[in-house]
Amino acid sequence: MKSIFKLIIFSLILFSCGVPQNKYDELLVERDSLLVVATENKELIEKNEELKESLSNLRENFDKVWKEKFELERDKNSKIVIYDSDALNYLKDHYEFYDSDKIYRNPKLRRIDSNQFVISLEECDKKFSDREFFWTSVVKELIVNNDKTYTLKTKI
């Protein structure tokens, strides 16, 4: 009797813990769909990481390009600073090369910009430099470019 009783209790426990086959099949299908979702999530996470890395590279490249552009613009727009002695040297060069038949004296400089001067001076042809009558006052404008070339124009 004890053994029958044990057998009944054991069978009750066994039957109460069991799942019908259709429920088991539903659980298998649900498990498979969850595995598919998990693998898709894993793929999406990997793609997200790739996109984050790509975005980071794009930001770095953008920063580099922007910095280079900014430096080029700054260099393009920056003016060189010319000192009074440099301006006198440009004036001397002009009269030695371009106006070699003339001489000048008493140059007075007035700075207009970091690379621009107005120069007041007296000039004369070399032939007549010994006579005061032929000396004339002239005002010239000196502009020095970033590449150290210059223009010296007579102002009217």
Image (spheres, rainbow, N blue to C red):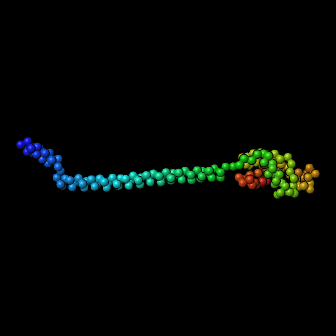
Q: How many marks?
A: 0
**Along the horizontal axis of the image, is 111 left or right of 61?**
right
Task: Tell me which residue sits at (92%, 56%) in the image.
Answer: 127
**Along the horizontal axis of the image, is 80 left or right of 16?**
right
Task: Tell me which residue sits at (51%, 51%) in the image.
Answer: 59
Task: Tell me which residue sits at (47%, 54%) in the image.
Answer: 54
Nearer-the-camera pick, 28 or 53: 28
Task: Tell me which residue sits at (23%, 52%) in the image.
Answer: 27
Confirm whether residue 139 shows in the render.
Answer: no
Confirm whether residue 149 shows in the render.
Answer: yes
Nearer-the-camera pick, 118 or 146: 146
Percent x, y for residue 132?
92, 49
Q: Locate residue 100: give its quadrant.
A: bottom right
Percent x, y for residue 17?
17, 47
Percent x, y for residue 7?
10, 46
**Along the horizontal axis of the image, is 41 left or right of 115?**
left
